[in-house]
Image: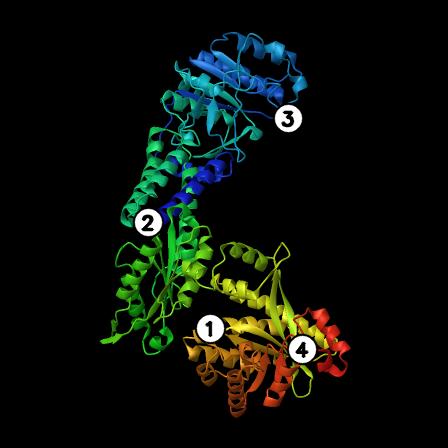
Amino acid sequence: MSANSFSGERSRHASIAIAVTLVVCLTLLLKPLDFTISAFQSKLFDRDASGEIVLLSVAAGADADKTARTLNSAVRNLQENGARRIFVDASLIENGSPATNNDLLRVLRSNPQDVQAFYPSPESGDEEVDQTRIDVTRFRGLNTLNSRLNRDFLNFAWSVPAVANDGRTTLGHALADTEKKRDQVAIDVTIDPDSIPRIDLTMPLTSQWDSVRGKTAVIAGKRTADDVRLVKSGSEQAAVAHILAAETLLAKRGQSIPVGFLPLIFGLLLYGCAQFSSKRRRKVAYILLIASMGALVPITALLGVQAFFSYPMVMLGIYAALRSVSLYEQRHLLVDSITGLPNFAALRRDLRQTDETRQIGVAVIKILRLDGIFATLTLREKRHYLKMIARRLAVVDPTQKVYFDDGKYFAFLTQDAGETENKSHLTGLRAIVSQPVEVAGRLIDVAITIGGDFRFEDSGEDRLSSAISAADQAREAFRPVFLVSDFENSEDHWDHGLTSRLAEALAQDRIKIKLQPQVDLRTSQFVGAEALARWKDESGGEIPPASFIPQCERMGRLDELTKRVLERSLNSLQVLQNAGHDLPISINLSAIQLVDDRIVEIIESRIASSGIVPSKLKLEITETARIEDFAAARSVMEKLRALGISFSLDDFGVGSANLEAVQRLPFHELKIDRCFVSELRECKMSRAIVSGVLRLAESANISTVAEGIGDIETYDLLADMGCERGQGFFIARPQVLSQLVSTLDLRKGGLFHKSVG
């Protein structure tokens, strides 16, 4: 499962890198990088031009008459000295001197096959040329070409088309005069522009004309506005780019690989590399992939093939960045710091990636009394102890991925084999794991419980939470392996339909509270109230707390529920104080929340932001029988007590609230369970139990509260027995805050009148 999971992640990263690169191919954003790579290629090889094409530069200034006379003289000298072909790349513009213009035309027309002239096309969009001064009809009969270039936004010329936009042949292709035509020629960046023979017509000429015999001559005007940038030499006359294109064609080079071809090919290769499950093979494949791309850079330069490497390079960069982030998460965010095993954040990620149709269940292993064991071990010994347990969990399948929660939980994913087989497998695994572990020459016990969730209608997150709850619900001696399906066979069943509705109610803050007043049984004074969580679902029906609170625990959402009840209780305290009623409020807290300082941070931060005096808040602790580490629980309670918060042991007298909890934890109050209070009048045993609790509390200097007072007789009997406080329907039913304020206002002096109870 893990190999497929990570292979899928790598494939997804490769797909993202390919897709992003192909989109970028549609833009010009990587041109600067292409220039850098081409500049590098141009330095690898240095080719000289053939020398068959000579560049003659003529000044193209404001004195058009002088320019025309220079052109006349140059063409005549080239003809007289045996130039094979003559190309005039200068603007043939009417200059106001008919004699000069006519003389130039006669020279050009004297041999139209050997002399090819150029003029700006009206469609070229050259804003620097006054189109009104061009008389195209005067140049009919001349073999005219186009010397315009396609440039990118950096003014670089990379290729020359065979035919310009106006339909005329371009200078570069006309210069080459090859039989095999090509729509585009990519300029060979390895040809040195400085190796092109050049004659400056602005300088006095002596014997330079001899160098053009039998060669092709290009007369080009020097106009800075027409300059173009070339990779190897920087800024040059536009005619130089055409000459380089011609030299490329003559050498039978200049092929160009389409922009999207290389990223597509390397993308497919990258995707293939990502499929290797072996890290070593994958590393070798990546190295070969990068090396092949690196080798192509000089190879294409050597062959004179234009290729755009920026896109596949960026693709590899994107993939490397995605993998780096993922590996960082695996090393730091998704890995337990002690064991090096993936943590539960990694498990949640893998659960989201798991196809639920594969019937993958979640098993959680809870290590009991781990804090006590760790108190005697060094960090190295702790690591060894935990790794031995992880190794045993993978004894059936060595490739099994085991997760650790940086606390006391291990987990792994396993195939569903049916309820009976699932429980049998986990029971057998527990027998293997529970064998003592040898650490530093001594044997240390391993006590565990296992919880499992093999339901597939819920999300992976919910299955993990319920598996943790099942491991908590399990008992080492009674039922050490507990599946979520076992809830369905107990009174405290798991309501599948309730799970999603409860998650939605928590997300939308639909959990409210009602307040049930408490009175001093001796003075009938209102002395406090208990905040009770209430939930009405979308249909308007009220869900009993006995149904949704255990479910909230199994979903791992108890802290979230506590936050909401706490915030509403603190708001109620503010309202009561503003109304002149200075009553404390009690809220319920499960004992399983006393495992670390997280609950301390929650309560402390919310009290600080509310401005309420902490002594006005009381925490009623439930489910104390599930406390496995009393030292940790006492530490948490002491920190809360230091803030001024007091504690009440809820449901005292029944299984969860026992004498061990009273002995080992700092409670201020015992809350006598309603099952004894409701039978106080009729049941002699109930009276004896309540009487014993009251004597115990008095001896230990602990306050007492009786819950479930339903009539005046019970009220009076409890008062006579010495119970200090009470609550129940006879005193007041749970009510919303506004009703409680009204109740307190109506009962003058804050007194409860038994006659109207």
Q: Amino acid at mark 2?
A: Ala
Report which residue position mark 4 lands on.
731
Q: Image quarter for residue 404?
A: bottom left
* Residue sitting at the far bottom: 699
Q: In this orientation, which residue lies closer to the viewer: 6 or 704?
A: 704
Q: Is residue 29 left or right of residue 609?
A: left
Q: In this orientation, which residue lies closer to the viewer: 101 or 496?
A: 496
Q: Is residue 223 above or below residue 704?
A: above
Q: Could you classify mark 3 by the number of other residues whose Cα lies within 10 Å: few (under 14), some (14-19), or many (20 or more)?
A: few
How is the protein colored in the picture? Answer: rainbow
* Distance from Cα at disc 2 to Cα at disc 3: 63 Å
Task: Find numbered disc 3 in the image and state the secondary structure of the residue it sits on.
Answer: loop
Please identify, in this view, whether the residue under mark 2 or under mark 1 is nearer the observer: 1
The numbered mark, 4 or 1, whose residue comes first in the sequence reads: 1
* Distance from Cα at disc 2 to Cα at disc 1: 35 Å
Q: Could you classify mark 4 by the number of other residues whose Cα lies within 10 Å: few (under 14), some (14-19), or many (20 or more)?
A: many
Report which residue position mark 1 lands on.
596
Report which residue position mark 3 lands on.
127
* Distance from Cα at disc 3 to Cα at disc 1: 77 Å
Please identify, in this view, whether the residue under mark 4 or under mark 2 is nearer the observer: 4
Report which residue position mark 2 lands on.
3
Residue 111 placement (x, y as % from top left): 49, 7
Q: Amino acid at mark 4?
A: Ile
* Distance from Cα at disc 4 to Cα at disc 1: 37 Å
Q: Image quarter for residue 619?
A: bottom right
Q: Is residue 609 above or below residue 90?
A: below
Please identify, in this view, whether the residue under mark 4 or under mark 1 is nearer the observer: 4
Dot 4 and dot 2 residues touching (CB under 8 Å): no
Task: Find numbered disc 1 in the image and state the secondary structure of the residue it sits on.
Answer: loop
* Distance from Cα at disc 4 to Cα at disc 2: 63 Å
The numbered mark, 2 or 3, whose residue comes first in the sequence reads: 2
